[in-house]
């Protein structure tokens, strides 16, 4: 990334992807979000191909079976940088410098028109200049409006094929208008950077913003994704629409979801069965999901029965450690990744992107994630609860597989254990581990989670012999699966810190007179798992 500061007029020049934009520095730009923009370019490239070429439109039946529907066959939509008659229309509702829209125009094939909107006059001035400087006048139009007003103006006519929401913090105020203004089968691209709220630091704020209670749970990053998805679904359902998640990512200090929106009042009846409350043990961190609704399937889909669950899935106190539960959610508990689509993204990803290696690594881990198992344990929490030496990840994964259960990582956490094994099995495995790695007697204080868990004996023996599938293919291939430690000035940025990352980095370089590391692919190094 090249950022230059011309001292006379304090203009910042930012080169990213195939775009070079200028900004006064009062307009928001975050260098660390290059990955977000690169990934969005990859997703849009795959989306255009699948949505517009008549190749396939994939829908899911309520049983979650894939049904491929051939769309209208259309002309070539491979051109980049020129308006394609049958290309897609995109609204970037919160555009700042216009960089993202300009990059879409120059790097995504098959676009008809992009509107780059911002409520800040200064930002819109920058957008206008940047459109001309990048010679994308034929594709990108600047707009000066409140995003919500603009979305409402388009909800009856000239709806968009794709709407990108990349706000400061929480996107929820834009969702209601966005779900109405995206076309049937169109794409919403939504970022949220208010991770403290979503990750359980402020459950009451999370409820007021997202209609869901967040928890301080080890799988908080995936829970954040699922809270955002349920929020978008809730807004869509109000208008007889529903969502289909294509790709959901937790990266750096934010989450981003890519979802399609479809019409179907009847399909909205299935929403309850795609949502769950989460009982989270305050002692050992075990979690249990309680679906909000149950669908009793019939041969003929139209005769499906929609019921409420009749039992509470947990006792008053945790069966493992004896501590109390918190109740969080509702969260989206249906799949959050569309593996078919993610493969399309991988197969069609543009080669020029600076973060290609990271995209490839993260998406490969997503392809390995278990679809039907929301949330996860972490090795650190399991061993921390018992104050025991942490077992190697390979060993624990092997024990789960040897016992006949499934296990995967999630891209959200490099120490994650996503499994369909019941929590009882997980604690039994840990009890077996403790037999050869004893817990200090000092820790065995009556009433504590460790005392209560280890007071019970494992119901069976578990084999820790290394299982052939314990090491996932993405790791065997040495892909860049998880991001390294944060860089200086790493964070979402706010209205008050318009230039985040690179500019501050340059300033600090100048001040200290020594060269700091560039924000580059090298910073995204492969993780060293505890194996
Ligand atoms: C995080 S920045 C967007 C960054 C940009 N998408 C990118 O990739 O560089 C958020 C932008 O939203 C704008 N904004 C905030 N509220 C808005 C609203 N109600 N309508 C339109 N723009 C708004 C701000 O002026 C700011 O430029
Ligand atoms: Zn417990």
Image (tube, rainbow, N blue to C red):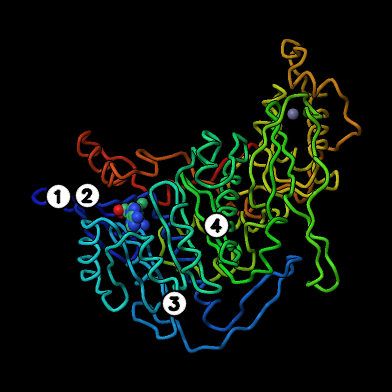
Q: Which of marks 4 and 3 is in front?
A: 4
Q: How crowded is mark 4: few (under 14 residues within 10 Å), some or many (20 or more)?
A: many
Front-most of residues 152 and 275: 152
* Image spot of residue 267 (x, y percent): 68, 67
Determine the secondary structure under disc 3: strand
Q: In which quarter of the image is the C terminus?
A: top right
Give the spatial CA distance, label 1 vs label 3: 36 Å
Q: Is residue 412 left or right of residue 297?
A: left
Q: In this view, does 25 lie to the left or right of 154?
A: left
Front-most of residues 289 and 111: 289
Q: Which of marks 2 and 1 is nearer the N terminus?
A: 1
Determine the secondary structure under disc 4: helix
Do residues under tags 2 and 1 come within 8 Å of each other at their CB atoms? yes
The disc placed on residue 232 is 4
Residue located at (40% from left, 81% from top): 79
Residue located at (39% from left, 41% from top): 491
Do residues under tags 4 and 3 come within 8 Å of each other at their CB atoms? no
Q: Earlier in the sequence, mark 4 or mark 3?
A: 3
Q: Quadrant of residue 488?
A: top left
Q: In this view, does 43 lie to the left or right of 309?
A: left
* Residue occupied by mark 3: 88
* Residue occupied by mark 1: 10
Q: Which of marks 1 and 3 is in front?
A: 3
The quadrant of the picture showing ligand 2 is: top right
Q: Is residue 50 above or below residue 23?
A: below
Q: In which quarter of the image is residue 61?
A: bottom right
* Residue occupied by mark 2: 25
């Amino acid at each position: 990334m090249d950022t230059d500061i011309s001292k006379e007029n304090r203009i910042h020049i930012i080169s990213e992807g195939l775009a070079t934009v200028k900004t006064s520095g009062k307009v928001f730009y975050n260098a660390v979000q290059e990955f977000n923009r690169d990934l969005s370019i990859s997703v849009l490239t795959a989306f255009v191909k699948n949505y517009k070429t008549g190749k396939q439109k994939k829908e899911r039946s309520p049983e979650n079976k894939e049904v491929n529907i051939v769309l209208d066959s259309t002309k070539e939509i491979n051109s980049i940088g020129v308006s394609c008659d049958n290309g897609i229309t995109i609204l970037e509702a919160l555009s700042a410098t216009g960089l993202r829209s300009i990059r879409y125009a120059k790097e995504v094939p098959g676009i008809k028109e992009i509107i780059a909107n911002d409520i800040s006059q200064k930002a819109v001035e920058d957008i206008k200049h940047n459109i001309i400087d990048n010679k994308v006048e034929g594709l990108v139009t600047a707009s000066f409006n409140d995003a919500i007003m603009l979305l409402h103006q388009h909800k009856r006519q000239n709806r968009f094929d794709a709407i990108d929401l990349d706000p400061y913090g929480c996107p929820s105020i834009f969702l209601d208008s966005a779900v109405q203004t995206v076309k049937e089968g169109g794409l919403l691209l939504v970022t949220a950077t208010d991770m403290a709220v979503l990750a359980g630091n402020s459950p009451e704020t999370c409820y007021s913003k997202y209609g869901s209670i967040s928890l301080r749970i080890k799988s908080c990053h995936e829970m954040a994704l699922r809270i955002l998805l349920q929020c978008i679904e809730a807004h869509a359902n109000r208008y007889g629409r529903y969502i289909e998640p294509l790709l959901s990512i937790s990266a750096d200090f934010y989450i981003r979801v890519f979802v399609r929106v479809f019409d179907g009042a009847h399909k909205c009846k299935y929403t309850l069965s795609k949502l769950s409350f989460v009982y989270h043990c305050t002692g050992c961190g075990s979690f249990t999901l309680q679906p909000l609704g149950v669908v009793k399937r019939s041969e003929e889909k139209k005769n499906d029965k929609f019921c409420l669950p009749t039992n509470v899935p947990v006792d008053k106190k945790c069966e493992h450690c004896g501590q109390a539960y918190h109740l969080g959610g509702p969260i989206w508990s249906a799949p959050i990744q569309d593996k078919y689509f993610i493969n399309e993204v991988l197969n069609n990803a543009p080669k020029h992107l600076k973060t290609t290696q990271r995209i490839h690594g993260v998406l490969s881990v997503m392809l390995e994630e278990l679809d039907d198992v929301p949330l996860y344990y972490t090795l650190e929490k399991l061993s921390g609860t018992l104050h025991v030496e942490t077992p190697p990840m390979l060993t624990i994964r092997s024990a789960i597989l040897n016992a006949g259960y499934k296990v995967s990582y999630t891209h959200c956490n490099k120490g994650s254990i996503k499994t369909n094994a019941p929590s009882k099995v997980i604690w039994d495995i840990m009890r077996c581990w403790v037999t050869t790695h004893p817990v200090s007697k000092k820790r065995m204080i009556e009433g504590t989670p460790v005392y209560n868990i280890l007071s019970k004996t494992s119901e069976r023996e578990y084999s820790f012999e290394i299982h052939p599938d314990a090491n996932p293919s993405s790791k065997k291939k040495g892909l860049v699966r998880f991001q390294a430690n944060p860089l200086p000035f790493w964070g979402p940025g706010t209205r008050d810190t318009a230039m985040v990352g690179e500019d501050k980095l340059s300033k600090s370089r100048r001040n200290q007179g020594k060269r700091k590391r560039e924000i580059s692919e090298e910073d995204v190094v492969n993780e060293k798992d505890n194996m």
